[in-house]
Image (spheres, rainbow, N blue to C red):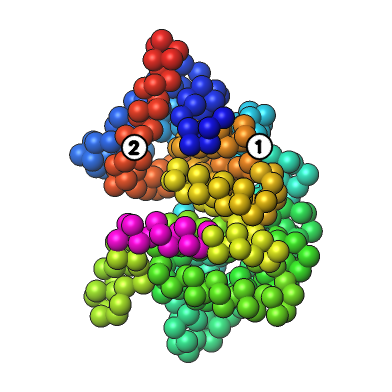
Amino acid sequence: METKNLFENTEVAFSLKTDSELERAYFLFKMISSEPLVKIGTAATKFALNINLPVEGLIRSTVFDHFCGGVNEEDCMPVVEKMHQKGVCSVLDYSVEGKNLEMSFDIATDKVLRLTEFAENKEALPFSVFKPTGFGRFEVYRKVSENEPLTDIETIEWEKIIERFDKVCQKCSETGVSLLIDAEESWIQKSVDDLILEMMRKYNKDKVVIYNTIQCYRWDRLDYLNLVLKIASEEGFKLGFKIVRGAYLEKENNRAEEMGYKSPICPTKKATDDNFDSIMSFMFDHPDVMTVFIGTHNEESCYKAMELMKQKGIEKNDLRVWFGQLFGMSDHISFNLGLEGYNVSKYLPFGPVKDVMPYLIRRAEENTSVAGQTSRELNLIKREKERRKL
């Protein structure tokens, strides 16, 4: 097959969707493509949930079932197994946004530990995942990042954070499940990076268990990779990175402007795309030390990665290269890559309907801002509907 047209095959892309699920997807992306509708819809949903109107059933049968795997891990398994039969793995992502209490950080840690045990020996679930701010307070990470002295209580909090990280990393090392750790805002990322590097030192000796996340809209990330490559090569451990474009664009630029420092974000979308490609090629230049998880919905980046693999003689199913997309989006990328024999994982969010709503609302809002993405989804769904004569 001509590689350049790989993502055009809608029959493969939507093979798991029934006719009615395809119609629902069309309806959802049509809604999401209209910014006023998203604003009204999210406001109405928040309001209805806050005053306990019985809307959970409606949410469950529309937006929730399209973007989420279920309310708990067992509930997700039919979806996980169906996708795995098509060559696509899953990353179970408990998408409940944390509260700022020590107790909730402990609960989040236990949840990740349980999910890691749940994934053990399941070929369809190669990864566990967590977000650093799920394990500790934002302000503590910020102070450690900016070398501000911690109070006695904060010192205890920071030690607890290190302990939680270590517990989960150790569990992953024991079970053979790899661990993806999400990225945060730039002004707390340094403490996260340093802590994850410690974990890599400890647990990535023979193979990559721990993955940090590189946000490629930050112009300083290639320098960072050069730095850690030098450390890992000298000390003899391996590096794992998930690369993404980045999620806090406006927040980052606004803070930089308010506080009068140079924005850490690339000045243009094109600069971000170029940076993503440079970082990806850099990682492919060092496959003996670096393992890459390419988290992207950008078709060009996927084609470039496939081309780089070919140039470097890296087999399609080499476990040092993974592709990842979110469940409910870019099925034309995930399932066509899976069919071709590449390693692909879908992030599969789950949790109680009410608790996952903040995640879903963010998804809808992000999609409205990436207009090209939504119209591409609509276009492909429309083509598949025509192919099925719906």
Instruction: Give the amino acid type for the residue marked by disc 2 in the picture.
Output: Thr
Residue 380 part of the magenta segment: no
What secondary structure is marked by label 1? loop
Residue 272 part of the magenta segment: yes
Residue 15 visible in the current orientation: yes
Residue 24 location in percent, x, y?
40, 24
Residue 42 location in percent, x, y?
30, 41
- Quarter that holds the C terminus: top left
- Quarter that holds the N terminus: top right
Residue at x 67%, y 51% (from the top left corner): 313
Q: Is residue 113 left or right of residue 368?
A: right
Q: Which residue is mark 1?
A: 341
Q: Closer to the N terminus: mark 2 or mark 1?
A: 1
Which residue sits furthest left?
Answer: 36
Q: Which residue is mark 2?
A: 374
What secondary structure is marked by label 2? helix
Residue at x 57%, y 52% (from the top left corner): 308
Residue 11 location in percent, x, y?
51, 22
Query: Which residues make up the magenta segment?
Result: 268-280
Which residue sits furthest bottom?
Answer: 149
